[in-house]
C-alpha cells in the first residue's frame, strides 16, 4: 500500500529481502504489473505460502492474441527469461486438449520446465504442471523430457513418480551407458537428488542403472548467514537445549526459526535445521529440506556443505546460473 501511494516502482530484484506476506500481497494485487505479480507468486510458492492454482490463475488471465499463442515456441526461444513467456506457454499447453496432441503437449511442458533459471521459478512451474505430467504416464517421451518430469515430480514430493520418470529416462536398455554422456551425468545427479528425498527408491533405480549413490547429504550455503548474528546465537541455544532435554516441539521450532524464507541460510543454519528436525522426529521433513536445499544449489554458486557435519564438500561450478540461490523455508507437509 505504501509503495502504491508513493508511486515507487517495484522490481522483482527487490524480492530477495521481501517478507512472505508481502510477496503474497503483491501476487494478488492487480495494481501491480503482471510480470511482477508472476515473479512474486513464484517466490511465494517456493516459500510454501502460496498455492500453485494462484499462479495458474495469473497465467490464465493474461490476454494473448491467438497468433501469440500459436507462436509460443518461437517466443520462448526469443524471450526465455520473460515471466509472460511462462504464461504464454501455459495457455498454449492448456489449448492442447485433443488426444492427438498428447505428444506435442509433452514436448511443450518439457520446454516450459526447461526455461526455469532459478529455484523459485523451477519450483513454481513444477507444481503448476504436476497434474499434466501425471497424465503423460505411458506416453513416449525423450530422455531429456523424462528427466525434467522426474525433477518436477520430486519438487511436488512424488518420489515414486520421479522414480518412474527416471526409469523412463534410461528406457528399455536399463543402463545409464545407453545415454549420451551429458544426459548420463544429469541422470546420476537426479538419482542422487532423489536419494535425499527417498533413499529406497533411488537405491533401486541406481542399482538397475548401474550407478552409485554418492555418500553425501549435500546442501549449499550462501556467502551470507542469518541476517542477525544475535538471533543465530539464540537459535543455537534453543536447539542445543531442545536436543539435550528431548524437547521435540522446541527442536522443531528451532528448525523453523533457522530458516528465514527470505534470506539464504548459512552453514550453521543448515546444520541446525537438519539436526533439529532429526531431534524433533521429523525424518520426512528433514529429507525434504535436504532435497530442496541441494536442488536450489544447482541454480546457485557457493560451497557445498554437508547437512550431517557442516563440512564443506567439493564445490559445484554453476557459473552459468543467474540466481544467487534461494534457501527454502521448512514447509510442513499438508494434511
Image (cartoon, rainbow, N blue to C red):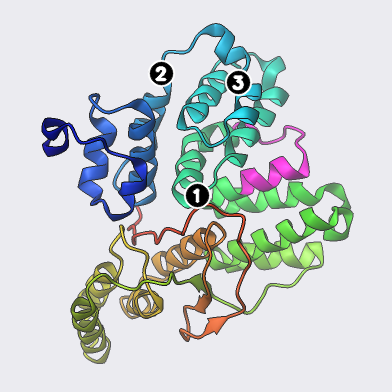
* Residue at 71%, 57% in the rendered image: 186
Query: Which quadrant would residue 257 be assigned to in this image?
Result: bottom left
Query: Which quadrant would residue 52 be assigned to in this image?
Result: top left
Looking at the image, is 55 positioned above or below residue 61?
A: below
Residue 88 image offset from top left, x and y in percent: 52, 22
Tell me which label, 1 or 3, sits earlier in the chain.
Answer: 3
Looking at the image, is 100 positioned above or below residue 159?
A: above
137 falls in the magenta region? yes
In-image side of 238 versus 65 (left or right):
left
Q: Secondary structure at mark 2?
A: loop
Marks 2/1 in contact by CB < 8 Å: the verdict is: no
Q: Which residue is mark 3?
A: 72
Q: Is residue 335 visible?
A: no
Q: Which mark is residue 118?
A: 1
Q: Is residue 210 visible?
A: yes
Q: Residues under labels 2 and 1: Cα distance? A: 22 Å
Residue 23 image offset from top left, x and y in percent: 27, 43
Q: Which residue is mark 2?
A: 62
The quarter of the rendered structure image containing the N terminus is top left
- Could you classify mark 3 by the number of other residues whose Cα lies within 10 Å: few (under 14), some (14-19), or many (20 or more)? many
Residues in magenta, as a range: 135-150
Q: Secondary structure at mark 1?
A: loop
- Could you classify mark 1 by the number of other residues whose Cα lies within 10 Å: few (under 14), some (14-19), or many (20 or more)? many
Amino acid at each position: 500500500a505504501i509503495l502504491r501511494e508513493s508511486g515507487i516502482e517495484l522490481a522483482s530484484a527487490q524480492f530477495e529481502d521481501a517478507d512472505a506476506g508481502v510477496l503474497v500481497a503483491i501476487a494478488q494485487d492487480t495494481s501491480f504489473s503482471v510480470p511482477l505479480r508472476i515473479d512474486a507468486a513464484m517466490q511465494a510458492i517456493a516459500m510454501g505460502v502460496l498455492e500453485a492454482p494462484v499462479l495458474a490463475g495469473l497465467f490464465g488471465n493474461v490476454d494473448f492474441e491467438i497468433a501469440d499463442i500459436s507462436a509460443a515456441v518461437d517466443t520462448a526461444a526469443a524471450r526465455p527469461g520473460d515471466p509472460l513467456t511462462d504464461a504464454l506457454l501455459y495457455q498454449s499447453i492448456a489449448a492442447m486438449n485433443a488426444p492427438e496432441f498428447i505428444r506435442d503437449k509433452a514436448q511443450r511442458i518439457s520446454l516450459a520446465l526447461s526455461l526455469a533459471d532459478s529455484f523459485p521459478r523451477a519450483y513454481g512451474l513444477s507444481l503448476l504442471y504436476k497434474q499434466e505430467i501425471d497424465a503423460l504416464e505411458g506416453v513416449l517421451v525423450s530422455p531429456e523430457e523424462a528427466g525434467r518430469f522426474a525433477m518436477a515430480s520430486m519438487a511436488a514430493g512424488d518420489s515414486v513418480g520421479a522414480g518412474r520418470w527416471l526409469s523412463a529416462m534410461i528406457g528399455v536398455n536399463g543402463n545409464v551407458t545407453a545415454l549420451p554422456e551429458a544426459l548420463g551425468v544429469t541422470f546420476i545427479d537426479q538419482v542422487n537428488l532423489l536419494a535425499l528425498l527417498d533413499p529406497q527408491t533411488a537405491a533401486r533405480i541406481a542399482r538397475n542403472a548401474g550407478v552409485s549413490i554418492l555418500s553425501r547429504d549435500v546442501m549449499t550455503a550462501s556467502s551470507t548467514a542469518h541476517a542477525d548474528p544475535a538471533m543465530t546465537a539464540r537459535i543455537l541455544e534453543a536447539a542445543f537445549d531442545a536436543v539435550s532435554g528431548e524437547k521435540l516441539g522446541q527442536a522443531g521450532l528451532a528448525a523453523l526459526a533457522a530458516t528465514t524464507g527470505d534470506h539464504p541460510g548459512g552453514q550453521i543454519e543448515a546444520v541446525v535445521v537438519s539436526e533439529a528436525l532429526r531431534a524433533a522426529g521429523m525424518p520426512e521433513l528433514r529429507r525434504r529440506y535436504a532435497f530442496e536445499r541441494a536442488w536450489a544449489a544447482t541454480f546457485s554458486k557457493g560451497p557445498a556443505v554437508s547437512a550431517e557435519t557442516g563440512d564443506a564438500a567439493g564445490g559445484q561450478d554453476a557459473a552459468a546460473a543467474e540466481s544467487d540461490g534461494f534457501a527454502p523455508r521448512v514447509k510442513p507437509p499438508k494434511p
